[in-house]
């Protein structure tokens, strides 16, 4: 996983809390060999790591051979992490993880997200791909094939949902409250005690999504298949919420201004971002009507691009959270600008377009789309709707799937 990153730009910061995983990758020892890590037992390696700072702890985990490939499909050099599950995953599988919801799997980017000491510690303590797969793949039946790097979106989504959402492959001996949902197979890793199998949860199916649109070379749908392959592998149904993606959008929730009061004198606001089947949320800021989050969150862009929905709530401990307003952002102009940029040879900073403020939208002012340092960004100032007051400032960045 680290070999490709080792020669990357060294100008990234590598200091302390909040450092980027990509920086840690760059700082790895170039002469390290996978066999070095295997020569020392896991417990001893972990104890040595925990004596180091965040960079040292993470670098130790990244050296584990099991983390060099995607935990779900085996694709080499995974650049994404499910923090809650403790696994390194590829871009294709990360989209499926996001559709499961943050209550099951919270996805972060190795390269694009900033990491705290606590997040690094959590990842190290989880043990990485080998430890997670020992748990979540303990009881895979013989007649079910694990996805491969070239597997379809249907195969990935089916397997990942079974693995993490339905928990179908857990060992019933280690988890007596959950029985294996498959009858024992010959030479299967499932124990006979799992013969009282039952389905943990059911899932609905829906029709396949329409023909995908491709966006440039980098913003392409890398999960796409050739038309001939589509014709030969048609299926009438697929899992609910399964979509293909054309890119990524990085949303920095900057701050709120003059938000509504929902407690006695103030509020405890947080923001939920929703795009298609995906949703992510910011941290809660206590007792503040002018909160500053400055928190970046990542979402995959579906092929049929829906509005980015923004919802603000007041956190309550003993009752339902209070609504503090909502708004919608049309991200299609940003994606179109990113597409145009990918086809051009533009190098210098410039304005690529804008989303014009009007009575038909919630913009306080025009949302200017700019090219800065090779990144396509847009600053948005939103007037919250269905509430007495409040403005939210957000920065958007369109990210190619290749990152």
Image (cartoon, rainbow, N blue to C red):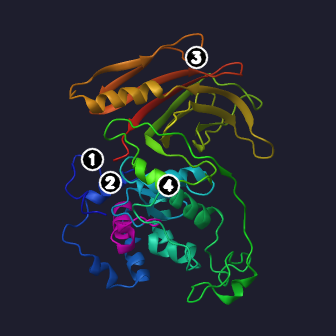
Residue furthest out toward the right: 319
Spatial CA distance of label 1 from label 4 is 34 Å
In the displayed structure, does residue 147 sit left or right of residue 65? Answer: right
Q: Which of marks 1 and 2 is nearer the N terminus?
A: 1
Q: Which residue is drawn at 58% across and 17% down?
A: 361
Quadrant hosting residue 124 = bottom left
Left or right: residue 133 versus residue 204 is left
Q: How crowded is mark 4: few (under 14 residues within 10 Å), some or many (20 or more)?
A: many
Q: Give the range drawn in magenta.
A: 54-73
User: Mark 3 and mark 2: span between their CA atoms?
Assistant: 38 Å
**Circles 3, 2 touching at the beta carbon (< 8 Å):** no
Residue at point 44%, 31% (across, down): 396
Answer with the quarter of the image where residue 187 lies: bottom right
Q: How far apart are marks 1 and 2 (CA)?
A: 8 Å
Residue 116 visible in the current orientation: no
Residues at marks 1 and 2 touching, judged by CB atoms closer than 8 Å = yes
The alpha-carbon separation of the residues under discs 3 and 4 comes to 34 Å
Asked if disc 1 and disc 3 are in contact, CB closer than 8 Å, the reply is no
For numbered disc 3, what is the local secondary structure? Answer: loop
Q: Mark 1 points at which residue?
A: 12
Q: Where is residue 265 in the image (x, y as percent from the top left)?
A: 74, 28
Which quadrant would the N terminus be assigned to in this image?
bottom left
Label 1 vs label 2, nearer the camera: 2
Q: Name the residue under label 3.
A: 361
Mark 4 to mark 2 CA distance (whole Å): 27 Å
User: Which label lies toward us, 3 or 2?
Assistant: 3
Residue assigned mark 4: 153
Q: Position of residue 10 (x, y in %)?
A: 21, 50
Compare marks 3 and 2 and give the one earlier in the sequence. 2
Residue 61 drawn in magenta: yes
The front one of 179 and 347 is: 179
Q: Earlier in the sequence, mark 1 or mark 4?
A: 1
């Amino acid at each position: 996983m680290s070999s490709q990153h080792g020669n990357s730009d060294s100008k990234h910061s590598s200091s302390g809390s909040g450092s980027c995983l990509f920086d840690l990758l760059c700082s790895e020892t170039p002469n390290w060999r996978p066999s070095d890590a295997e020569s020392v037992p896991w417990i001893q390696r972990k104890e040595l790591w925990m004596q180091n700072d965040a960079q040292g702890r993470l670098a130790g985990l990244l050296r584990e051979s099991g983390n060099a490939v995607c935990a779900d499909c085996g694709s080499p050099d995974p650049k994404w992490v499910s923090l809650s599950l403790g696994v390194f995953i590829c871009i294709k599988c990360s989209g499926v993880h996001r559709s499961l919801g943050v209550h099951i799997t919270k996805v972060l980017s190795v390269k694009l997200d900033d990491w705290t000491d606590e997040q690094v510690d959590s990842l190290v303590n989880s043990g990485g791909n080998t430890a997670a797969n020992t748990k979540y793949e303990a009881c895979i039946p013989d007649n079910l094939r694990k996805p491969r790097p070239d597997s379809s979106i249907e195969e990935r989504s089916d397997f990942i949902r079974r693995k993490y959402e339905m928990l179908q492959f857990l060992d019933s001996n280690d988890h007596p409250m959950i029985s294996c949902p498959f009858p024992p197979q010959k030479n299967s890793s499932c124990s006979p005690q799992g013969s009282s199998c039952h389905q943990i949860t059911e899932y609905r199916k829906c029709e396949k999504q329409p023909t995908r649109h491709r966006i440039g070379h980098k913003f392409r749908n890398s999960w796409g298949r050739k038309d001939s392959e589509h014709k030969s592998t048609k299926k009438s149904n697929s899992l609910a919420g399964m979509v293909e993606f054309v890119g990524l959008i990085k949303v920095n929730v900057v701050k709120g201004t003059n938000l509504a009061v929902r407690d006695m004198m103030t509020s405890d606001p947080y923001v939920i971002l929703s795009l298609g089947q995906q949703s992510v949320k910011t941290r809660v800021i206590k007792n503040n009507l002018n909160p500053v989050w400055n928190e970046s969150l990542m979402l995959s862009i579906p092929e049929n691009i829906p509005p980015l929905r923004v919802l603000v709530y007041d956190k309550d401990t003993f009752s339902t959270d209070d609504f503090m307003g909502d708004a919608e952002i049309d991200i299609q102009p940003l994606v179109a600008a990113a597409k145009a940029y990918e086809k051009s040879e533009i190098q210098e900073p410039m304005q690529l377009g804008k989303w014009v403020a009007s009575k038909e939208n919630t913009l306080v002012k025009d949302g200017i789309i700019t090219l800065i340092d090779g990144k396509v960004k847009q600053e948005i100032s939103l007037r919250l709707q269905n509430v007495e007051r409040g403005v939210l400032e957000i920065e958007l960045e369109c990210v190619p799937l290749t990152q």
